[in-house]
Image: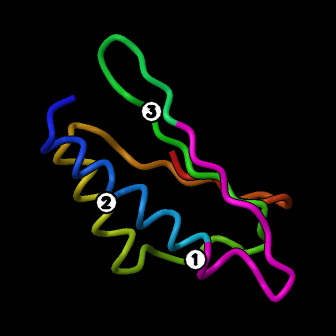
Amino acid sequence: MNSERCWRLGLIVSELITNSERHAFGNDGGSIRVELLPSLSFVECRVTDSGTGEAIPGPGHGLKIVEALAKSLGGTIDQRFGPHGATAS
């Protein structure tokens, strides 16, 4: 992956971690896991938290930036929320 694409992926990961920290945890804290899963033609990145935050109705500014960065890389963002945390891929 060239440096321009790595830089954009780094911004995406940073924003997703920040979102987890801001929205997923109360005073009890929790964990955030980052996974990069390479294949022959793409990289899948997952940021998963163990928080209790619920889906926010409509994307905020940070998620709009993440979506634009993912699109510029030819990718998409998928978010899933459950009783044991959230995952953004």
Magenta residues (range): 21-35
User: N-terminal of the two: label 3 or label 1?
Assistant: 3
* Amino acid at the residue labelled 1: Ile
Q: Is residue 3 magenta?
A: no
Residue 4 falls left or right of residue 77: left
Q: Residue at x 57, y 47 (%)?
A: 34
The label shown at residue 81 is none
Q: Which mark is residue 11?
A: 2
Quadrant of res 59? bottom left
Q: Nearer the N terminus, badge 2 or badge 3?
A: 2
- Seen from the viewer's position, the closer of residues 70 and 30 is 30
Within-10-Å neighbours for mark 2: few <14, some 14–19, many 20+: some
**Number of other residues with Cα within 10 Å of mark 1, as a class: few under 14, some 14 to 19, many 20 or more:** few
Q: Mark on residue 56? A: 1
Q: Quadrant of residue 30?
A: bottom right
The residue drawn where x is 28% and y is 68% is 65
Is the residue marked by circle 3 packed among few (<14), some (14-19), or many (20+) residues within 10 Å? Answer: few
Seen at 42% across and 63% down, the residue is: 14
Where does residue 85 sit, x and y in percent of width and height? 76, 60
Q: Indicate whether 10 appears above or below 15.
A: above
Residue 82, horizontal then vertical, whole percent: 78, 57
**Dot 2 lies on which element?**
helix
Amino acid type assigned to the residue bearing label 2 in the image: Leu
Q: Name the quarter where the N terminus is drawn.
A: top left
Residue pointed to by mark 3: 44
- Give the CA distance from mark 3 to mark 1: 23 Å
Give the distance between the C-alpha atoms of the residues marked 2 and 3, in whole angstroms. 15 Å
Q: Residue at x 70, y 74 (%)?
A: 24
Q: Nearer the viewer, mark 2 or mark 1?
A: 2
Task: Indicate left or right for 32 with 28 as reference.
Answer: left
